[in-house]
Amino acid sequence: MSPPFVADLHLHTQASDGTLTIADIPEAAKEAGVDWVAVTDHDRIHSELDDTISTIDGITIIRGIELRVQTETQRIDLLGFQVEPTDELQAEIDRLQQNRLNRAQKIIACVEAELGITLDIEPSSGIGRPHIATAIDESSAPYDYTEAFEELIGTDCECYYSRDVTTVDDGIRLLKEACSIVGLAHPLRYDDPEAALKHTEKLDAVERYYPYGREIDTDSIDQAIERNDLLETGGSDAHNKRLGKAGLSSSQFNKFKSKLRL
């Protein structure tokens, strides 16, 4: 039986908050039965991917990015595929990464002061709250990973600090200048999916296939696809080594692939 997906276009590595390395990707992809993947780390372009499209041990890897942006009412995520960073995009990435680092230092200092412990974590580029939650879980503190978010570092908690993000108009512009395809990530995860989907008027694609973990109604996504002539993307949003929980079939991926610079 052939695998249900040939492409998983949304995954994270150790460059942001995932566990995969680039060297891990071929084995993980083959186990999932996919031939193409997109590395879409948060606000980062993976430094080990020298080209916008690479082939490693038979698996084709698209260099991408997931960029969080601020709209008038909420924060949403954009996926850029086949990214070739402009100077302006790289400057924005550098700014965001410095802000991530500063924020992490504040959160860590707050947790250590609150709990009277020292966490075994050194803030570095790409750090996010999942890294800090893991350090809390592995410390002597009476909190596991989930409890760390719920009681210490989650939104509105004592040790939560917000971070700067790019405005939606700037984010779309920067990615459109640098990428072959720019899409909206997981539209049904937002507090206001309809408002998020309105921004697809300026995009090329939308993540139609995503492992929400619950029953969903995709009518609003399908209407946006038809209204704005969007490409469909799909991916697992993997932060571990399990790929292929969502993706594109061969016919779906061929439409996406036709818009890449090959």
Image (cartoon, grey):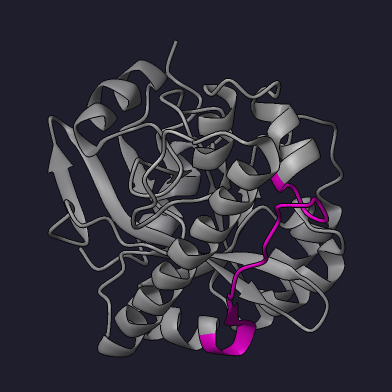
Depicted 66 relative to depicted 209: above or below = below
Residue placed at 18% from the left, 53% from the top? 49
- Does 128 lie within the magenta span? no
Depicted 169 relative to depicted 84: above or below = below
Q: Give left or right: position of 23 versus 185.
A: left
Residue 248, visible in the rendered structure: no
Residue placed at 62% from the left, 82% from the top? 168
Q: Position of residue 52 (x, y in %)?
A: 22, 62
Q: Position of residue 8 (x, y in %)?
A: 44, 39
Residue placed at 35% from the left, 82% from the top? 89
| Residue 133 picture quarter | top right
* Secondary structure mainly formed by the magenta segment: loop
| The N terminus sits in image quarter | top left
Residue segment shown in magenta: 153-170
Residue farthest top in this picture: 1
Q: Give left or right: position of 8 versus 60.
A: right
- Does 165 lie within the magenta span? yes
Q: Give left or right: position of 202 versus 227.
A: left
Q: Position of residue 150 (x, y in %)?
A: 79, 37
| Residue 125 picture quarter | bottom left
Observer-nearest of 67 and 3: 67
Q: Give left or right: position of 215 versus 68.
A: right
